[in-house]
Amino acid sequence: GDSLTAGFHAFGRLFAPYAAALGEELKLSEPHELWVCGLSGLEATELMKKKTSPQIRDAVRRTGPGIERLLSEKTFDLAFIMLGTNDLASGEDEETFNAIKKIHEACHAVKLRTVALLVPPSQAVAKFRDIADSREKVNDL
């Protein structure tokens, strides 16, 4: 995922991933592990291009593997995928959707089920009509 998955806040000095709250709400049975792979300031299209990379550096100098690399090293039961926020300003809605779809397909290739989370609202969506329109288009695809 992107910075929202990582839990980016306080200008990148602090991180509070949504996975902890999600785990509490889902009331998962024990034992379980929630694993977060969120990179800040990157677009879905960029993450897709770097899907086999052993290490991707994000805008706040944190690193994580590309999706295919991660899935070759670790096994998961279910993946929640939230991407696209950083792509909205580009206006390349089809390209953004296709990158997100390909990331889901990378998971499906290793028999990993996915849940697609919509691109959430943001301050930019509230402030700029073109970004709001892009968000709506990506979420509708």
Image (cartoon, rainbow, N blue to C red):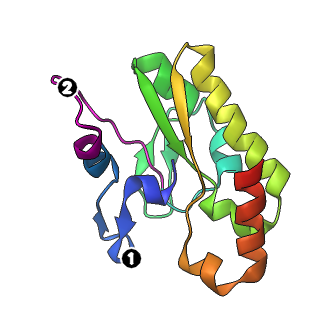
> Which numbered dot is residue 29?
2
Question: What is the quadrant of residue 110 in the picture?
Answer: top right
Q: Relative to 130, is 57 on the left or the right?
A: left
State yes or no: residue 130 in magenta: no
Residue at image coords 71%, 73%: 132
Up the image or down, 48 lies above or below 109; here it is below
Q: Secondary structure at mark 2?
A: loop
Q: Earlier in the sequence, mark 2 or mark 1?
A: 1
Q: Is residue 36 magenta?
A: yes
* Residue 54 point in image, percent of width and height: 50, 32
- Residue flagged by tag 1: what amino acid is it? Phe
Quarter of the image for residue 125 reads bottom right
**Marking on residue 112:** none
Q: Magenta span: helix, strand or loop, mainly?
A: loop
Region rendered in magenta: 23-39
View extreme (bottom): residue: 127
Task: Please name the amino acid that badge 2 sits on.
Answer: Ser
Residues 131 and 68: in front is 131
**Looking at the image, which residue is at 60% across and 57% down?**
119
Residue 81 location in percent, x, y? 53, 41
Question: Which mark is drawn over residue 11?
Answer: 1
Q: Residue at x 81, y 49 (%)?
A: 95
Q: What crowding class fits label 1: few (fewer than 14 Cα within 10 Å), some (14-19), or many (20 or more)?
A: few
Q: Mark 2 and mark 1: span between their CA atoms?
A: 34 Å
Badge 1 element? helix
Task: Name the front one of labels 2 and 1.
Answer: 2
Q: Where residue 111 appears, x then y in whole percent?
A: 55, 13
Question: Badge 2: how crowded within 10 Å, few (<14), some, or many (20+)?
Answer: few
Asked if the residues shown at circle 2 and circle 1 are in contact, with their CB atoms under 8 angstroms apart, the answer is no
